[in-house]
Amino acid sequence: MKIRLRIVKRKIVYRANKIRELIKKKFGTYSRLADFLKVNRSTITKYINGTRKPDYHMTKMLEKALGCTGEDIHGPTESR
């Protein structure tokens, strides 16, 4: 269980770092991205930290703004 938890945490950290890089590259700051999306800066921070997930509409807006995919934001979907 601990090994699986570590792997999941690494994936989340990797995804967060990738999104941070995209934000820095395209907008410079969280505040500029938040202004562009018309949300609070704290909302963007919560998405990055994983304390809140963007809904479908916000995911699409983030994809367009950052030039990434939903998998970059939410991670790959597992099919069973």
Image: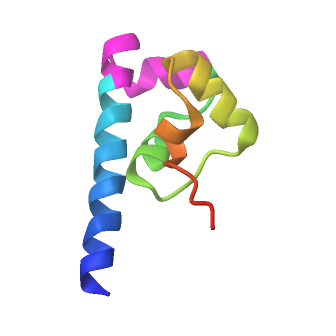
Quadrant where the C terminus lies?
Answer: bottom right
Could you say which is closer to the camera, residue 34 or residue 71? 71
**Was residue 12 drawn as part of the magenta stretch in this picture?**
no
**x, y percentage for residue 52?**
55, 55
* Residue 44, placed above or below residue 14: above
Instruction: Tell me which residue sits at (47%, 37%) in the image.
Output: 72
Which secondary structure type mostly characterizes the magenta part of the structure? Answer: helix
| Location of residue 18 (image quadrant) | top left
Q: Residue at x 29, y 26 (%)?
A: 21
Which one is in front, 46 or 41?
A: 46
User: Residue sitting at 49 percent across and 48 percent down?
Assistant: 75
Q: Does 35 appear above or below 18?
A: above
26 inside magenta stretch: yes
Q: Which colour scheme is used?
A: rainbow
The answer, for residue 38, to whether it is visible in the render is no
Nearest the eye: 72 or 24? 72
Residue 70 lies, in percent from the top left, at 58, 37
**In which quadrant will I find the N terminus?**
bottom left
Q: In this view, does 38 lie above or below 14?
A: above
Where's residue 55, x and y in %? 70, 45
Residue range of the region highlighted in magenta in the rendering? 22-36
Residue at x 51% of width, y 49% of height: 76
